[in-house]
Amino acid sequence: MPGLMQDWPLTLDRILEHARRWHGGREVVTRLNDGPITRSTYSTIYDRAKQLSHALAEHGIAREDRVATLAFNSARHLEAWYGIMGIGAVCHTLNPRLPIEQLVYIVNHAADRLILADAICVPLLRQILPRCHSVERVVLLAEEAQMPTDLAADAYERWIAGRPTDAVWGDFSEETAAGLCYTSGTTGEPKGVLYSHRSNYLHGLTTLMPDVLDISGRDVVLAIVPMFHANAWGLAFAVPAVGAKFVLPGAKLDGASVFELMESEGVTFSAGVPTVWQGLMQHLETHRVRPTTLKCIVSGGSACPEALMRAYQDKYGIEVRHGWGMTEMSPIGTLNVPPDLATPAVKQGRVLCGIDMKLTDDDGRPVPHDGHSFGHLWVRGASVARAYYRRETENILDAAGYFDTGDIATIDATGILQITDRAKDVIKSGGEWISSIDIENAAVAHPKAALAAVIGVPDAKWGERPLLIVQLKPGESATAQEFLEFLEGRIARWWMPTAVRFVEAIPLGGTGKIDKKLLRAGMPAS
Ligand code: ADP
C-alpha cells in the first residue's frame, strides 16, 4: 500500500528555490580569478540561473544533453550548475588541472554540446577544442569586455542579459541524471560517474548532520574543495539548503589568499584537501597570524597528517574534521569528528547514514572490526554509483550490490574506519601489508618535512620494502638518518623504510593528491 504523502520529487532545483524564498538576501561572495571580490545573493543567483536556463533552451539544450563547465568556484559557476540541472540537462564538471589528453577523452566520451568556461581556461580550450567535435558553442563566464579576440566564444554576461527568469525547472523524475564527473583515471581510462537529482539531494542533506559537516544558516562557508571535482563534496547543495553565507574563492588557493578571504568574509567553516591546509598553516606560522572567525575545517581527499590536525587544534583552537570519500560516492563516505580539541581525528570516521559498508579479505571473506585487521572496503547506498556512464553493461557491484572502493581499511569496534592504503599503493613485505599512509603521517610530523610519500620498491628478500620520499620545507636540509631516527617508536619496526630520498617537489595530481604513479616511475629499486 503506498503511503499517502505528496509526490514531491527530490530534484535539485528545489534547493535553490528554497534558498531564494527563505534566504534570498543571504550573500554569495566570489573572489574572481583575477582578484576582485564580487557579491551576489541566493535570490540573484536564482534569477540568473533561470536566465541561463532560458539561453540553454534557446540553443536547443534539452533533457539529458551534457553541458560542461570548466571553471573554478564562483557564483557564475553555481548559476551554471543550477541553470543546467534545473532543466534536466547534465552538468558535466571538467577539471582544468587534468592532462590535455584526458580532458579531450572526457569531453568526447560525454559528447558535451556546450562548454561554460572561466576566461583563464582559454589557453586550455585552445588546445582541446580542435579535437572536441561534439562542442557546438563555448561560453566564457565573463563580461563582454573580457573576451579574447582569437577564440570563438560568447560572453556569459551578454548571453544571459535581459532574458526572462521564468524558465521551467524540475517537473521530471528525481532519478533523472543531474551531474557527471569523471574519475581522474589514475588507473586506466577516466570513468564517468552520473549523479542523479535524488542521489545529490539526499547526499547534500545528509552531509548537514551535526556529526558530518554540521553546517547551519549561521555559518559562513568557504568552499575550497573545487566544484570541478567530486561534486564539491556536496557543498553547492548543502550550503544553499540551510541558507549559510557562501564564499567561493576562485583559483587562488595559496595560504595567503585563503587566509585573507577567511578574515575579510568572516569564514567559520571550510573544506579542502590536506595540501591546502598545509599551505594555510605555513602562512599562519611564517606570518604569525591567527584566523579570528574560523571554527572548523574539514580535510578529505587524502589522509590528513596527525601533526597538521594537532597544530590547528592545539595552537589555533580550530576543529579539524576528517572525511573519506570518492567520486563514485557523491563523494562523502565517512566523517570523523574529534571528541575534543586535544584529540585529533586521525582515522577517517563513521559511515554516513544512508551508506552501508563492509570489509573483506582477498577471498571475499568478512574481516573482523577489531581496528587492526586490514581488508578491502566495499560500499553501497543511495549516493553510490551502480555503473559508469556509457559502460552500463559492465557490472561493478558484487552479488550483494556492494561497490569495491579500491581502498584498504580497518574498522574498529566502535565502527570507526581507517584507510590504510589504496589497494594499488599497498606495500606487501614478506606477505604482510604495510600501510604507506601511516608511515607518511609519522614522517610528515618531522619539523623539517613539508610533504612525505611512501612507495613500495621491489626487494629481493621481502618482495617489497617501503621507500620514504621527503620534500623538505623551504630552506631546510636533513639527512636520511635523521628521518629514520625520528620514525623509531612511531611506526612498527618492520615498517621502517629501507631508504629515504629527498626531492625538490613531490608531484601532485589533478586533484591535489600525491601522484604515486609518477613517483614510482621515477624511483629505482632499493
Ligand atoms: P580519483 O583521485 O581517482 O579521481 P577520488 O578523487 O574520487 O578519485 O578519490 C578517492 C580516493 O581518495 C579514495 O578512494 C581514497 O583512496 C582517497 N581518499 C579520500 N579521502 C581520503 C582520506 N581522508 N584518507 C585517505 N585516503 C582518502
Image (cartoon, rainbow, N blue to C red):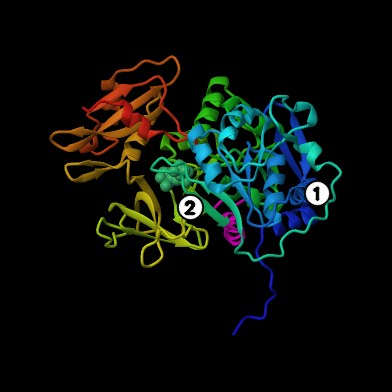
Residue located 76% across and 43% down the image: 27
Q: Secondary structure at mark 1?
A: helix
For label 2, being within 8 Å of ligand 1 is answered: yes
> Which quadrant is home to the C terminus?
top left
Residue for badge 1: 47
Q: Is residue 423 above or below residue 264?
A: below
Which quadrant of the structure image shows residue 445? Answer: top left
Residue located 33% across and 17% down the image: 478
Q: Nearer the viewer, residue 464 or 495?
A: 464
Q: Nearer the viewer, residue 459 or 238?
A: 459
Q: Nearer the viewer, residue 13 or 190?
A: 190
Residue extending farthest to the bottom is 1
Q: Is residue 414 visible?
A: yes
Which region of the structure is painted magenta? 196-215
Tally of numbered tags: 2
For label 1, being within 8 Å of ligand 1 is answered: no
Q: Residues within 10 Å of mark 2 (few under 14, many from 20)?
A: many
Ligand 1 positioned in quadrant: top left
Question: Distance from label 1 to label 2 (Cα)?
Answer: 31 Å
Q: Position of residue 321 (x, y in %)?
A: 51, 45
Q: Is residue 448 visible?
A: no
Circle on res. 328: 2
The residue type indicated by label 2 comes to Glu
> Which quadrant is home to the N terminus?
bottom right
Q: Secondary structure at mark 2?
A: helix
Q: Residues within 10 Å of mark 1 (few under 14, many from 20)?
A: many
> In the image, 304: left or right of 462?
right
Asked if residue 122 is among those painted magenta in the image, a careful observer would answer no
